[in-house]
Image (cartoon, rainbow, N blue to C red):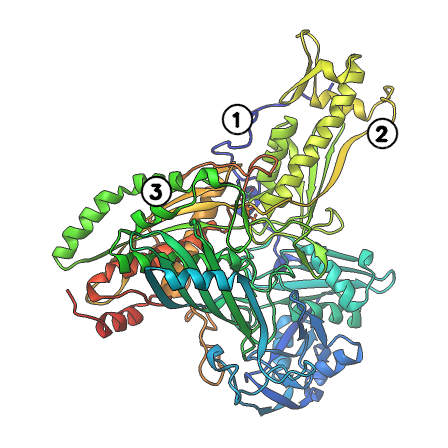
């Protein structure tokens, strides 16, 4: 007999189970997580990277003689050496190219120039100083606004025929129709706003351990990757190794947030070093390297305009965007979407027309433009529209909530095709907003604000009502380097009734080992504790595009549901055979099949699993065993939404902003693990405080990065954030098999505009309509003193 399965708590309704604790925390809270730097292999060597101190210049010479003579150094790699192997350049995920090690030119400060492999990390680092590089400096372009001027030096002279710094032009919406609506609109409000360059700054920096076996030609690479399978394909394409001989393992990952989607030169250097030395090689980036050379996010200068009636009906939105992509186009967006999903800039509103024209430029800065905790530029889009709506409210003298309520899409308008062609799957925006208003006691807050204003205190209330587009993506529309954005899942029930689910997505702390077990438990009725989730290893999991842009639940989550249903269907056939009835005679009650009308006859899924591997006569044409495989393409994105209300106090004497309250009501459809969702929302809201008030990667005019440490790049801590107040509504996605939408990034996307709207609201007495993030005390002080009369 199978061992009796112990059901605990709400195991029979695992999806939505309120306090199901995270399986992975057992190892994390004991310090037993296995991150890249924990990987130790016998005879392992250590790699360190030499980086250029200048932002733009030619390499005159690289002399490695002294470094090679260091007694502990085993190998020194240069661009010239890589060029001999055809490996000096690599493709980016945006169909651009980027040097692995610079051969003749430096394009941004701290670009990779050479590497040293030594017995230990200290020796490798010491030997970097023995490499003598002579540079000839070139003029630098750091300001995207001047990048296209005729006098600007051409950064990408490696690209044939390139005569300027244009990266791409892109357009969406209907210009003519939009301009026509604007021409006859009663009210038009415009605002320029900058979404500054910020960095995902995961706590674990990037790193890799490569182990090449010269005898059978197998390469094992442990690396900080959010997309192990896609990386494997790319390594095969770049290094010419057969794909089946490459195994990419993404072990426990200490946060990704988009930073660990691209392939970095360090990964390739580590692979090359292992192949050339025949030994395992480890590379671990330090904080300085992570902040200065790995993928940044945002960096958009947006000029937006909104057209409306005097009564506050929004009619149209148009925008021009200048996008700074740094020295190489390192975004990781689907091919057809060079500006990611910025096209959703029409937000949650029922409008008549929209248009966006974007120009992207190269500058002498680190490459990137990654989706930092957002689905491919949705953060920028949401910020634009939610700030514009507040500017309009200010112009009309309307309450920003009233203005939003007047214009929100209504539930019966879904599925809704936006003016830029996005098909929103479902939503009940008004209910979500009303829930937030209720939690906040919005009317009470406005009363309090009026009283405070009368006594000279600066209290602000900011709102944002946002829609995200997550779960890339439908095969017809979306690919990265020609790979369609599908996810695989395999489920195997073992003879004793426990199960292993193998998924292609990869957790960086989101708790997939727990939530994916919950999904399967719900479908096949065994406890989540009996289901192991395997991920992050290309030899052990099916092909798929990885975890970013909150795509795990919409895509891999759906794959997990469907593969579990396949297993259940097979179990159904077996149960009919075992009970000598037809499948139609059986009904499924979570965990067991019952003969309709004969309560004595039933079989648990565990009994069926045992039989599936046994000796009984199988139904015709059906194989034994109880397992299934699926390769799932979503039919659409999912569109989670939220309504956020932020309450701030600004100190009139110092311009310091305190976020006093923050109410976040999210709708991610069916909620699998409410505790994990809450954690995701808390993290994203904290991100928002960072971006709105503290974080910015800046450069001086020579291209020196001024935010190269966490002393300069300020991350929010528990001290800067309030006790978050969260709530939810549930509007299932009609095309996801259990109605779930993504949640991982909603709060990062939705919170910055709410915070900025609150601060601008606080400073209304000073006549402020807009101020650019981050709203540091010095910036706000200037804004307060440069503007109209203080109260
Ligand atoms: O792709 P990523 O895992 O970063 O984002 P996600 O799909 O939004 O999921 C983040 C975490 O929240 C995962 O553990 C999900 O399973 C969980 N989640 C949930 O419990 N219910 C949802 N409707 C969405 C996500």
Above or below residue 325? Residue 378 is: above
Q: Quadrant of the N terminus?
A: top right
Q: Which mark is residue 436?
A: 3
Mark 2 or mark 3, which has the lower sequence index?
3
Question: Which SS class for mark 1?
Answer: loop
Which residue, as the protein is rendered here, is positioned at the far left?
455
Label 3 close to label 1 by CB (< 8 Å): no
For this rendering, which residue is in front, 424 or 294? 424
* Residue occupying the point 54% across, 40% down: 22
Instruction: Name the spot of residue 314 as percent of width and height, x first.
Output: 37, 54
Residue at 46 percent of width and 61 percent of height? 178
Tell us which disc is closer to us: 1 or 2: 2
Mark 1 = which residue? 10
Whether label 3 lies within 8 Å of ligand 1 gets the answer no
Mark 1 or mark 2, earlier in chain: 1
* 3D distance between C-alphas at marks 3 and 1: 29 Å
Residue 177 picture location, percent across and down: 48, 60
Is residue 716 something one can see in this rendering? no
Residue 239 appears anywhere in the view: yes
Quarter of the figure that contains the C terminus = bottom left
Left or right of 398? Residue 210 is right
N-term mark: 3 or 1? 1
- The spot of residue 10 in percent (x, y) is 52, 26
Q: Secondary structure at mark 2?
A: loop
Task: Name the residue that disc number 2 marks.
Answer: 623
């Amino acid at each position: 007999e199978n061992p009796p399965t112990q059901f605990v708590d709400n195991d029979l309704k695992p999806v939505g189970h309120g306090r199901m604790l995270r399986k992975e925390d057992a190892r994390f809270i004991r310090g037993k997580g296995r991150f890249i730097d924990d990987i130790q292999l016998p005879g392992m060597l250590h790699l360190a990277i030499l980086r250029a101190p200048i932002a733009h210049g030619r390499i005159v010479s690289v002399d490695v003689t002294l470094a090679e003579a260091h007694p502990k150094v085993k190998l020194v790699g240069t661009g010239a050496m890589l060029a001999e192997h055809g490996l000096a350049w690599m493709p980016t995920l945006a169909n651009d190219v980027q040097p692995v090690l610079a051969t003749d030119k430096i394009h941004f400060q701290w670009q990779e120039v050479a590497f040293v492999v030594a017995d230990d990390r200290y020796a490798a680092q010491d030997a970097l100083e023995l490499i003598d590089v002579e540079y000839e400096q070139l003029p630098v372009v750091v300001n995207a606004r001047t990048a296209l001027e005729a006098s600007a030096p051409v950064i990408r002279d490696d690209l044939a025929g390139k005569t300027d710094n244009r990266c791409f032009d892109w357009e969406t919406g209907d210009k003519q129709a939009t301009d026509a609506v604007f021409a006859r609109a009663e009210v038009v409000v415009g605002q320029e706003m900058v979404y500054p360059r910020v960095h995902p700054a995961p706590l674990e920096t990037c790193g890799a351990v490569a182990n090449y076996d010269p005898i059978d030609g197998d390469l094992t690479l442990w690396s900080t990757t959010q997309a192990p399978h896609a990386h494997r394909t790319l390594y095969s394409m770049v290094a010419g190794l057969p794909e089946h001989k490459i195994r990419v393992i993404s072990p426990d990952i200490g946060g990704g947030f988009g930073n660990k989607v691209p392939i970095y030169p360090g990964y390739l250097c580590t692979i090359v070093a292992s192949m050339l030395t025949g030994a395992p090689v480890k590379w671990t980036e330090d904080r300085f390297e992570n902040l200065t050379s790995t993928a940044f996010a945002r960096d958009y200068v947006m000029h937006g305009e909104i057209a409306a009636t005097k009564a506050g009906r929004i009619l149209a939105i148009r925008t021009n965007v200048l996008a700074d992509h740094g020295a190489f186009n390192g975004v990781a967006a689907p091919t057809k979407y060079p500006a990611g999903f910025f096209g959703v800039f029409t937000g949650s509103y029922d409008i008549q027309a929209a248009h966006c024209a974007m120009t992207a430029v190269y500058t002498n800065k680190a490459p990137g433009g990654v989706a930092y905790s957002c689905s491919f530029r949705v953060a920028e889009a949401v910020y634009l529209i939610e700030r514009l709506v507040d500017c309009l409210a200010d112009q009309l003298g309307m309450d920003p909530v009233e203005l939003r309520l007047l214009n929100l899409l209504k539930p019966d308008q879904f599925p809704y095709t936006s003016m830029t062609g996005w098909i929103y799957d479902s939503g009940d925006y008004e209910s979500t907003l009303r829930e937030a208003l209720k939690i906040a006691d919005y009317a009470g807050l406005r009363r309090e604000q009026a009283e405070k204003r009368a006594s000279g205190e600066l209290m602000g209330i900011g709102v944002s009502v946002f829609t995200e587009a997550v779960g890339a993506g439908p095969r017809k529309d979306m690919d990265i380097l020609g790979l369609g954005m599908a996810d695989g899942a395999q489920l195997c029930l073992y003879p004793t009734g426990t199960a292993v689910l193998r998924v292609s997505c990869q957790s960086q702390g989101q708790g997939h080992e727990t939530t994916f077990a919950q999904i399967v438990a719900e479908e096949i009725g065994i406890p989540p504790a009996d289901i192991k989730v395997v991920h992050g290893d290309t030899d052990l999991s099916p092909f798929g595009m990885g975890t970013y842009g909150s795509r795990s639940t919409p895509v891999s989550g759906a794959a997990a549901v469907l593969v579990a249903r396949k297993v259940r269907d097979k179990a159904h056939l077996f149960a009919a055979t075992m009970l000598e009835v037809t499948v139609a005679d059986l009904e499924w009650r979570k965990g067991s099949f019952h003969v309709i009308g004969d309560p004595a006859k039933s079989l648990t899924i565990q009994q069926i699993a045992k039989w599936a591997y046994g000796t009984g006569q199988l139904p015709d044409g059906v194989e034994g065993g109880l397992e299934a495989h699926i390769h799932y393409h979503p039919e659409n994105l999912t569109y989670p939404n939220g309504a956020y209300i932020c309450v701030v106090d600004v100190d009139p004497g110092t311009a310091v902003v305190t976020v006093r309250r923050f109410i976040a009501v999210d709708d991610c459809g069916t909620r699998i693990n409410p505790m994990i969702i809450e954690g995701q929302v808390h993290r994203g809201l904290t991100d928002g405080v960072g971006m709105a008030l503290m974080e910015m990667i800046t450069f001086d005019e020579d291209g020196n990065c001024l935010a190269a440490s966490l002393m300069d790049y300020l991350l929010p801590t528990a001290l800067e954030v309030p006790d978050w107040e969260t709530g939810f509504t549930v509007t299932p996605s009609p095309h996801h098999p259990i109605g779930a939408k993504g949640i991982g990034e909603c709060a990062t996307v939705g919170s910055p505009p709410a915070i900025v709207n609150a601060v601008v609201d606080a400073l209304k007495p000073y006549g402020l309509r807009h101020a650019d993030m981050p709203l540091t005390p010095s910036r706000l002080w200037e804004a307060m003193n440069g503007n109209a009369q203080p109260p």
